[in-house]
Image (tube, coloured by chain):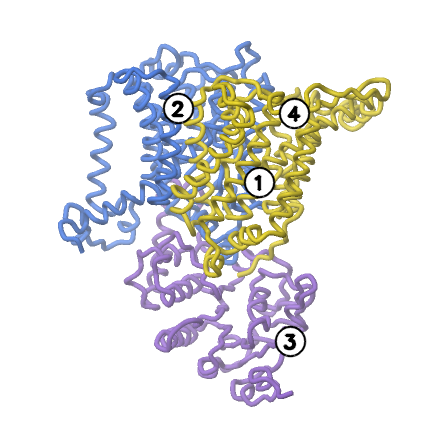
Amino acid sequence: MSENNSVLMEVKNINLRFGGVVAIQNVSFDIYEGEIRAIIGPNGAGKSSMLNVINGFYHPQEGEVWFNGEKRPSMEPYQIAKTGIARTFQNIALFKGMTTIENVMTGRQLKMNKNFFWQMLRYGPAIEEEVEHRRRCEEIIDFLEINHIRKTPVGALPYGLQKRVELARALAMDPKILLLDEPMAGMNVEEKQDMSRFIIDVNEEFGTTIALIEHDMAVVMDLADRVVVLDYGKLLADGTPTEVQSNQAVIDAYLGVPH
Amino acid sequence: MFYRETGQFKSKYREELAAFPLAEDKVGIAILLVIAYVFIPIFGIPGLSYEFTMGAIMIPVFIFTITTLGLNILLGFAGQISLGTGAFMGVGAYSCYKIMTIFPDLNIIICVILSGLVTAVVGMIFGLPSLKIKGFYLIVATLAAQFFLEWAFIRVAWLYNYNDSGGIEGTNKEMFGLIVSGPQSDALTRYFIVLTLLVLLTWLASNVIRGRIGRSWMMIRDMDIAAELIGVRPLTAKLSAFAFSSFYVGISGALMVFFWLGAAEVESFDVSHSFTYLFMVIIGGLGSITGSYMGAALVWVVPVLIKEIGKTVFGFDAFVMENFSIIFLGVAIVVILIVEPHGLARLWQITKQKLRLWPFPY
Amino acid sequence: MEILYAIFIAPFVEMGAYPDLFIQALWDGFVAGTLYGLIALGFVLIFKASGVFNFSQPILVVLAALSLVSFYQMGVPAWISVILVLIMFYALAWLVERLILRQLVNQDGNILFMSTIGLTFIIIGAAQWIFGGVPSAMIVDELGFPNGSLEWPMFGGGVYFEMIDVSAAVIAVIMIVILAVFFSKTKIGRGLRAVADDHQAALSVGISLNQIWVIVWFVAGIVALVTGIFWGARSDVSFALQIIGFKALPVLIIGGFTSIQGAIIGGLIIGLGEKIFEIYWGPLLGSGVEGWFAYVIALVFLLYRPQGLFGDKLIERV
C-alpha cells in the first residue's frame, strides 16, 4: 500500500436501476492509488454491477465517477478502456477461439495503431509494432507462469489457468486500475494461494491499483488494504479489514439477525 | 515423424510471427505453388480433358476460393453471418462492367480491383445493421441486401447499359498485347491471372487476420461484450470486416463474369448461390484459410464430377445428376456438422497433429 | 415537389378514389399474410420445442403439396393421398430425429440451423428426383373445398373473395386455436416447452427428448400440408413455392420466434404491408418490390425492437 493516500478513483452517490429493480442505491467510496481495495457482500448485493458501472458497461441513473481527479463524462466502454481501466470477469470472458498468447495480445489492441495498409502487407511498421507488443506480452506470460500453455487454445484450458490468462490479458493493457471480479471463485486452496500471490505481485511490482470482488473472507482479510461492504445495493461498511470484521451491521448481514 | 517442429528454434519474435514458422509448411506451400504454376498448365489433370480442367474445374475453383475467403473473413473470423454473398458478387460484376464501359482503356485488372472497392463500400452500408443486430438475426439484414440487390440488378437498367438481354457481357481486353479476357481469350491466360490474384489475396488476408485488425474481428466474434470492454470499437471492427470481406467477394464476382463465364444475368447471383458459398465456408472450416481452399474445391468439384461421370460413364440424364449433386451437398453439410463442426480444416489439423507423432501413437 | 406528392399524397388519393380496389388489396394481403403466418407457425412450433431454427419448413410445404398431387395423379383417392402424405411426414420426422437431430444434441443453435439447410438441400434433390419438377395444379375440388368466388358489390365496383381463400383463412384460425390450446393445456405441450427451455433439465425429469422431437416435427409437417394445399391452390404446385419461405423469416422477426399469435400477426403485417406498398408505391420504384419489402419492414422492427412484438426484453450481463 502506498504511503500517500491520494485518491485515484471515487464513485459518488451511484444509483443504478433495471426497470423497477434497484441494483445500487446511493453508494459512494474511493480507491487510493496503489492499494488493493476489496468489495464484498452477499450474492445480489450489487458488487458486479458496481464494477460494471466503473468500467462503463452500465450507465447509472444518478451519480458520478471520478478518475484521476476528474469527473468522467458519459463514455462508451471502449473509450473508458482507453483511460486505463482493465478488468476480469466473474464468468470467464476469454476469447475462446484464440490461443493464450493471442488472448494476451488482445490486451495490447489499444496501444497498436498501424493502419490497414501496413497490416495487409505485414511489413515495416506493422510487424515492428507487433514484435514490440509481443515482447511485453511474453513478459507478462512469464510473470504469471503460463509459458507452457502459450499456444494452447484457451477453450481447452482448465478453469484455474483460464482465470490466470484472463488476468494476463488485463495486465497487458498496462492499466492504472485493475478490476477483478471474483478472481478466485471455484478454485481450490492451492489455486487460491497461487492467485493471491499473483495479485500481490502485480500490486507490488507494477504498482497497479486493484479493486477486487471476493467471497472468501480469509483471502480478503489477507489481501485487501481496505474493504467496502455492500448489501442489497447499499453501502454497509467501509474501512480496513479489521474494522469491517468487527462491524455489527456486517456480521448481521453475513450471519443473519435473529428474529 | 515426417512433420515435426523439434529442433526448429527461433531466436527472434519476427521469425515466430512469420506466415509459416515450420520448415515443413514452407516446403509444402512451395510444392503446391509449383504444381499450380507449372504442372497443371503443362500436364493438366490426368484423365480429364484440358478444356474441362481449366474451364470447369481450376478457374472456377480459384474464383470461388476467393469468394470463400471473403465470406470466411466475415463469418469465420468476425462472426457476422451473411446470406448476401451471391448479391455482393453481383455488385462486383456489375460495377466492373460499368467501370469498363466508362473507362474502356483502363487495364482490366485495375477494373477488377476497383470493383472490389465498390463492393467494399456497398458491403459496409449493408453491414451497418450489424451494429444493432446480433448473431442469427443478422441473416435478416443480409437477406434484405440479397433481395434488394437482385431486384436492382433487374430494375436498374443503367447497370447493364440498357441492353435488351438484361445481362452483362465481357468484351476482349488486352494486356501487354495479350487478350486476357473476353470471348477470344485463352483459358490458360485467364488461369494464370486468376491464380495470381488468388495467391496475392490469400497472402494479404493471412497478414490481416494475424495482426491487430484480425484480432479485433476475432474478439468481436468470440465475445463481443468483453471485446468492447477491452477497447475494441464495434463500429470499426464490424464495418472493417464487412468491407474487407466484401472486397474479396466483389473481386471474385468480377472475375467470375469476366474471367470465367464471359457473360452473366441476375440468376448467377441469386440467393441459392449465397447458400452454396456458405456451404463452402462451413464444410471447409470456419476461421481457416486452408479450409477456404478445401471447402471451395470440394463443394464445386464433387458435383461437377458427379454430373460428368454420371453423364459419360452411366449415361444418366442431366436432370437426375443435377438432383443427385444437390443431395450430395445436403448430405455433405449434415455429415460434416455431425463429424466435425469445424470443417475439413480441423480434420486436416488433426491429421497433421498425428503426423507429428507418427509412427508413435502418443 | 412532384416526387414528394407522388410519395406522400398520390397513393392516399388513389385509395380514397377507388375504395373497392383498396379493399380488394387489403383482402389479398390478408390472405397472403395468413399463409405467411402458417409457414412461420411451422418454424415457431419447432423452435419452441427444440430451439432449432428449422430452415427446411418452406421446403416441407413444397414437399407436402407436391407429394399430395403426385399421389393423386397416381390414382390414389384424394383423401387417402392426404393420409399417405401424413404417414410420409411421420416417417420423415422419425428419420430426421434419428439421423440428424439425435447426432447433434447439445450443439450450438447455429449448427442445428445449418444442418436444416443441409436437410433442405436433401429434400429438394430427392423430391425433384422422385416427383419431377413439372408444375401441376392443386387438387382443390377433389379434397372437397368450395370453389369459385363471391363478388360483393360495393363503392360502385366489386370485391372478389375466392372461396378457397376464405377456407384458408378459416382453417388457419382453427389451427392456431388448436395449437395454442395444445401448447398451454396438454401434457405433451408442457413437455415441449420444457424441452425448449433446457434439454438436460427436461431429460432429468423424465421427458423423452427423442419422442418430443418426432412429435413436433410431425406437427410442423401437418401445418406444412395445410399451408401447401392452400398456397398450391393460389399458384401452381412447384418448387417456385419455396421462395415464399423466405417471407417467413421477416414474419418471425416481427412476431418473435416463440409466439404462435406472433407468427400470425407478423404474417398479417407483412402480407398487408407488402401488398399495399406494391400496389400504391411500387410503381414509383419500377414494381417488383414485393421481393424485398418484407425484409425492410423486418429490419425496421429489428432496429427498434430486436426481440419481436411478443418476445421478452433481454438484459446483457457480464
| Amino acid type, label 2 | Asn
Residue A124 seen? yes
Give the blue chain's letter: B
Residue type at tag 3: Lys
Residue at 13 percent across and 49 percent down: it is: B359
- Label 4 sits on a secondary structure element that is loop
Q: In this orientation, does residue B193 appear? A: no
On-image quarter of the C terminus of chain A: bottom right
Q: Give me the C-alpha separation between circle 4 and circle 1.
A: 48 Å
Q: Are marks 4 and 1 on the same chain?
A: no
Q: Nearer the viewer, mark 4 or mark 1?
A: 4
> Which residue is the site of mark 3?
A234
Residue pointed to by mark 1:
B128
Q: Nearer the viewer, mark 3 or mark 4?
A: 4
Q: Are marks 2 and 4 in contact (CB under 8 Å)?
A: no
Q: Crowdedness of circle 2 by 10 Å Cα count: few (<14), some, many (20+)?
A: many
- Write down the residue under mark 2: B323
Q: Position of residue C105 (x, y in %)?
A: 42, 50
Q: Disc 2 versus disc 4: distance between alpha carbons? A: 34 Å
SS for dot 1: helix
